Amino acid sequence: MKIGVFQTHAYEQPYLQVANEEFQFDLKFFEPRLNEQTVDLAKGCDVICSFANDRVNREVIEKLRDHGVKLIATRSAGYNHIDIEAAKAFGIPVVRVPEYSPNSVAEHAVGLILCLNRKIHRAYQRVREQNFSLNGLVGFDIKGKKVGVIGVGRIGKVFAQIMHGFGATVLGFDLEEDAELKAKGVLTYVDLRTLYSASDIISLHVPLTPSSLHLINEDAFGLMKKGVLLINTSRGGLIDSKALISNLKTGKVGSAGLDVYEEEGAVFFENHSEEILHDDVLARLMTFPNVLITSHQGFLTAEALGNIATTTLKNIDDFCKGRPLANKVEA
């Protein structure tokens, strides 16, 4: 079984190779992203393995079908980069990794909060320049603050528990309530308007769907407290970036930690340090001293990478052996 692994990075290849010791697949690693220009690399592959910023649209899927690809296995929980309806139409199942390490993303979100709140990123740069002044570095205690968690799934649940451990009052919004969290007093479920208006910190942990696109928009910002700390480690499209910039300029948003960005596909995961940044919105966000951007690294722990590799190859093995596909994405 020949597997074309697209958008392969140096940090993940060893984990895939170790996981493959059990399965013994023929892994072909491709550095480029999968898109209309690179899809012909899949010739001769039985399975292609995609990642979050590949562009697996209808045109690509049709060519994959023509090249004999029988399965698309994405190394991610999200699958909005894949046209699921087109995959169904061309008879190619799609499998994903629904859970790899909820702690990795939740802990990264907490790290962004601590860094922004206590101005650690600014203090680090000051000290390197032998500037030991504390002016402008005042933060606040998280204990006693209200933390809003939008999406209390696997990752949101871990995040809520960590914030509860800090002594924060945790407010949650989700279409389904977690009885265990409620029983333990970890959080209180509220409606979205209440969460926006009451929270000192808001963290996003929902998937990107047509209904959640630009969930955080001008109307949502209008309901929030002045100086709110906003965190997004889920999907960039959840936030209207232009509205975020407007509300950073007015001070409605006190600080923002972004591990994702709605147009990240053209930039993230690659070294562009010798190039001109053509994304004016991202360039503007990077000028704010109270905005901290990381390039979609919330998942980047040894535990998560190992789980992603193992689950991905197990999904493929299940397909090859005709077993039920537990992680199949349904159209």
Image (tube, rainbow, N blue to C red):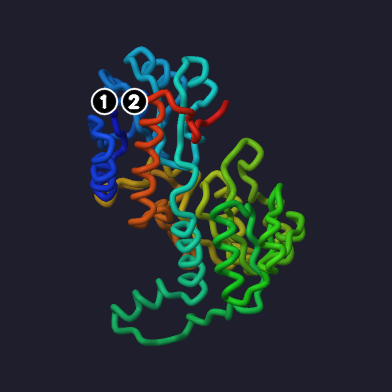
- Vertical side of 52 occupied by 243: above or below: below
Percent coordinates x, y for residue 168 in the rendering: 63, 74
In the rendered picture of this protein, how many numbered marks are placed on residues? 2
Q: What's the residue at 36%, 87% (across, down)?
A: 132
- Name the amino acid type tagged 2: Val
- Name the amino acid type tagged 1: Lys
Percent coordinates x, y for residue 147 in the rendering: 64, 67
Q: What's the residue at 33%, 15% (across, down)?
A: 68
- Vertical side of 288 occupied by 87: above or below: above
Q: Report the residue marked by disc 2.
A: 47
Q: Earlier in the sequence, mark 1 or mark 2?
A: 1
Q: What's the residue at 25%, 44% (across, down)?
A: 13
Q: Quadrant of residue 3?
A: top left
Which corner quadrant holds the C terminus?
A: top right
Describe the element under mark 1 as helix, strand or loop: strand
Q: Nearer the viewer, residue 229 or 280?
A: 229
Describe the element under mark 2 as helix, strand or loop: strand
Q: 254 left or right of 289?
A: right
Q: Residue furthest bottom?
A: 133
1 and 2 marks in contact (CB < 8 Å):
yes
Label 1 and label 2: CA atoms lie apart by 7 Å
Give the label on residue 151, or none. Answer: none
Which corner quadrant holds the N terminus?
A: top left
Percent coordinates x, y for residue 88 in the rendering: 51, 19
Characterize the local packing of mark 2: few (<14), some (14-19) or many (20 or more) Cα atoms within 10 angstroms.
Answer: many
Q: Report the residue marked by disc 1.
A: 2
